[in-house]
Image (cartoon, coloured by chain):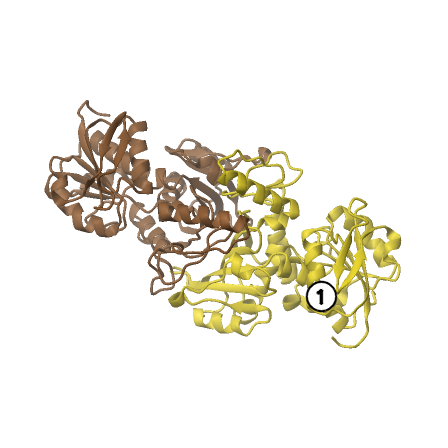
Chain colours: A brown, B yellow
Amino acid sequence: MANNHQYHVAIVGATGAVGQKMLETLEDRNFPIKTLTLLSSKRSAGKTVRFQNKDITIQEATPESFEGVDIALFSAGGSVTKALAHEAVKRGAVVVDNTSAYRMDPEVPLVVPEVNADDLKEHKGIIANPNCSTIQMVAALEPLRQEYGLSRVIVSTYQAVSGAGNEANDELKNQSEAYLKGEDLSAEILPVKGDERHYPIAFNALPQIDKFQDNGYTFEEMKMINETKKIMHADQLPVAATCVRLPFFTSHAESVYIEVEKDNVSVEDFKQQLSNAPGIVLEDDPSTQSYPTPLSAEGKRDVFVGRIRKDLDHDKGFHLWVVSDNLLKGAAWNSVQIAEELIEKQLLTKK
Amino acid sequence: MANNHQYHVAIVGATGAVGQKMLETLEDRNFPIKTLTLLSSKRSAGKTVRFQNKDITIQEATPESFEGVDIALFSAGGSVTKALAHEAVKRGAVVVDNTSAYRMDPEVPLVVPEVNADDLKEHKGIIANPNCSTIQMVAALEPLRQEYGLSRVIVSTYQAVSGAGNEANDELKNQSEAYLKGEDLSAEILPVKGDERHYPIAFNALPQIDKFQDNGYTFEEMKMINETKKIMHADQLPVAATCVRLPFFTSHAESVYIEVEKDNVSVEDFKQQLSNAPGIVLEDDPSTQSYPTPLSAEGKRDVFVGRIRKDLDHDKGFHLWVVSDNLLKGAAWNSVQIAEELIEKQLLTKK
């Protein structure tokens, strides 16, 4: 940290899957907290949460909750952000928002610190945290793009249920137990809470994450496509995505195909580049069957890359396997990391 | 069937995951069986199996077991095929082999009946059944290739554990139960029985199917690449594959990106073409969240296709989601279908 100042931090959505990880991450990072205000919907208000050996009572989030707050970490759904983020900014807080509410707003920086920390300098009070599946992909691709250029991205994802919240975790657990007992499976949450149809996720794969858009892509796929271009400042970069929900609790994995601009780049070049990249751990040795998996990445803040291969037909084409904890680098850690950057860069006073 | 003749059929590997499905499929298809000989390793010999209301005792497979056999369906591993397939052919049987032993042998037709049934005419006693993940992909792509040409294939797979046999099914079941009870997971089979390291598959994803090759690709990936070219008679077709094992029991799913040769092809063109294709069921309507899943395809002989989208940056690029029961179209049904074609085409006498 750049100084010894301490901050008043608020978490909006403190009882959710990401909110819980935000608390853990602030504690792990020994974040310079003066006061911690935990906010939630009326339903969860009144519960207490343990933080640094103290009980903190969760309060209902209202515009007035943000009086005196320096940094507000939002993760309570897009409608809560839309109702309260500007209220927080009005009261002097800088908002780091983990929903999709303002991600594509040209006034709002969309930041993965390893990729575009300098975009924070343009913030006007709200900074957006990208979609989980986007964050880990751009973190892995940026060091390659810087060195070799990037002319194409095609990704197929393998995504954990916790991206859909604690209710989705419970659904996977309950369905798995039922399936193993030979009972019928009831599905009420996945693939998308509030959508018309629900399918079992236990021992299954659902090629739908978030709602379908008019172009036949899901919103999750369009988030990966549009957010990648915004974060990398690469409007013309072709990006294609197929997003699939799978029966595991934590970590997203991604099968990523890219084409670079430079000629004669080797797998060894890629490995060297990624070994030296911030936030990236190379885990790639076929001779010892070394590669990352969702279970091995769980609870870690890094992005893990393995299975790097050159395409057999395209000299500029490469395949990678990218895995990261969707609740940490994909959400809580990236948000806290943005907050740390704001302090480091002395950007906590909005323009 | 072309005539009323009945045949002496042998199944080698009758107690395995695929062998069991071969028995069910022969029964379901009312295959014209005069005599059914069930063969296995010495270890499983002596067990009895119920078929068409009769108990059949499984015998140890020896060269002499094939005396009088017309059609021998092999699914007991490559070493058994190498030891016994030619012995069976010597005794007048035609072998349909579900292992990788002879798939790339130029003397051996590699057949998916919807794609290259005519290759059966060149058989010299052995016909190879392709790898499960290859079969469903080429079945889905062939009707598109015929109409629009095909210039590129990039696939990421989502594969069921049953492709690694009954032991892998048991491992997924046991690990899932242990995980849900909060117990430690022990891994002894997956990703590859007999390989050095084992990883838990329950609530996880393993980016390794079959052993690593010197080029960094796994053997499963190379099977998809090489077999696709052979089946489609398209040596120059660029095919890339990333193969991933997932925690479900049955059906493989595939996220497939292709480029066609013709201009101005639409998603509607694709849908019409696939609707009329043999063995393909189109299940693709975003407005009703209709798409195939591993659970919905289980127990069915068809190949299901959904999530058809045009690439947003490449006018000749399309994305598809292809799902099929890996033990049926991927193995048992494709083998029985080859046997039916051999009868239909009067090809049971080897050249």
Left or right of A40 in this view: B139: right
The 10 Å Cα crowd at callout 1, few under 14, some 14 to 19, many 20 or more, is some
Return the x and y of residue B306 as percentages of the image width and height.
48, 64
Determine the residue positioned at 14% across, 42% down: A88
Residue B229 appearing in the image:
no
x and y percentages locating residue B3 in the rendered image: 78, 77
Horizontally, residue A193 falls left or right of residue A315, namely left
Question: Quarter of the image holding residue B43?
Answer: top right
Q: Is residue B312 visible?
A: yes
Classify the position of the C terminus of chain B by image quarter. bottom right
Q: Which residue is mark 1?
A: B27
Which image quadrant: the N terminus of chain B? bottom right
The amino acid type, in three-letter code, at marker 1 is Glu
- The residue located at (48%, 61%) in the rendering is B320
Single out the residue that lies furthest toward the top. Answer: A4
| Disc 1 chain ID | B
- Left or right side of B228 for A237: left
x then y, percent, for residue A222: 34, 56
Above/below status of B58 relative to A337 = below
Residue A78 versus residue B301 in the image, above or below: above
What SS does tag 1 mark? helix
User: What x and y, as percent, mark residue A189?
Assistant: 38, 54
Task: Please give the name of the residue rendered at 40% of the width and 67% of the height, measured from the top-left corner.
Answer: B288
Asked where in the image residue B140 lies, by quadrant, the reply is bottom right
Q: Quadrant of residue B93 in the image?
A: bottom right
Name above or below for residue B252 compared with residue A34.
below
